[in-house]
Image (tube, rainbow, N blue to C red):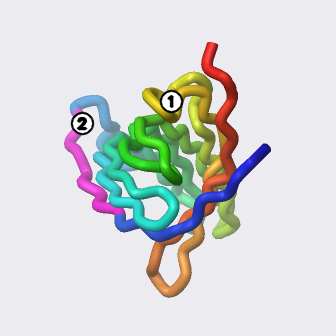
């Protein structure tokens, strides 16, 4: 059985220096700090790697973040993996719960998150299931 958690979140992005970054500035590294509210009451920390191109509206990013808090009535943590691209303004984003990353009462968590941005405000929908932990 799957459930859907909904709510809002705030994100703070902190660009990080990188000694491997090419001189053209096309690659970047960013710290993520988030606060989730709603069916998921949690905080997260993570890192994002970005790639910009010379074509306006085309870019890519990957990110990993550890989410800690309460999902429904269960406490614990889990990891989200992001893979995003923008092709000349058309976005594509997949956010997946890393298999077997759930801890405590969230052990066995699996699912996908969707991010919605409306008028500059961020919200989420997390479609998830809890499976028996191995």
In the rendered view, tell whether residue 37 sits above or below residue 19: below
Q: Is residue 18 visible?
A: yes
In the rendered view, tell whether residue 12 sits above or below residue 73: below
Which residues fall within the magenta stretch? 11-18
Q: Main secondary structure of the magenta part?
A: strand
Q: Residue at x 51, y 68 (%)?
A: 7
According to the picture, the residue beneath numbered tag 2 turns out to be 18
Q: Is 107 colored magenta in this rendering?
A: no
What label sits on residue 102 in the rendered view?
1
Q: Residue at x 45, y 79 (%)?
A: 121
Q: Residue furthest right?
A: 1
Q: Nearer the viewer, mark 1 or mark 2?
A: 1
In-front residue for pair 89/126 = 126
Q: Is residue 47 left or right of residue 56?
A: left
Q: Residue at x 34, y 56 (%)?
A: 34
Quadrant location of the C terminus in the rendered image? top right
- C-alpha gap between disc 1 and disc 2: 31 Å
Q: Residue furthest front?
A: 73
């Amino acid at each position: 059985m799957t459930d859907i958690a909904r709510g809002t979140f705030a994100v703070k992005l902190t660009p990080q220096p990188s000694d491997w970054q090419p001189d053209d500035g096309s690659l970047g590294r960013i710290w993520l700090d988030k606060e989730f509210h709603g069916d998921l009451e949690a905080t997260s920390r993570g890192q994002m790697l970005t790639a910009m191109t010379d074509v306006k509206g085309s870019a890519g990013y990957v990110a990993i973040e550890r989410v800690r808090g309460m999902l429904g009535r269960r406490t614990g943590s889990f990891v989200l993996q992001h893979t995003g691209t923008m092709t000349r303004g058309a976005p594509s984003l997949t956010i997946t719960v890393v298999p077997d990353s759930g801890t405590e009462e969230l052990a066995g968590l699996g699912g996908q998150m969707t991010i919605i941005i409306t008028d500059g405000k961020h919200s989420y929908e997390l479609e998830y299931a809890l499976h028996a932990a191995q």
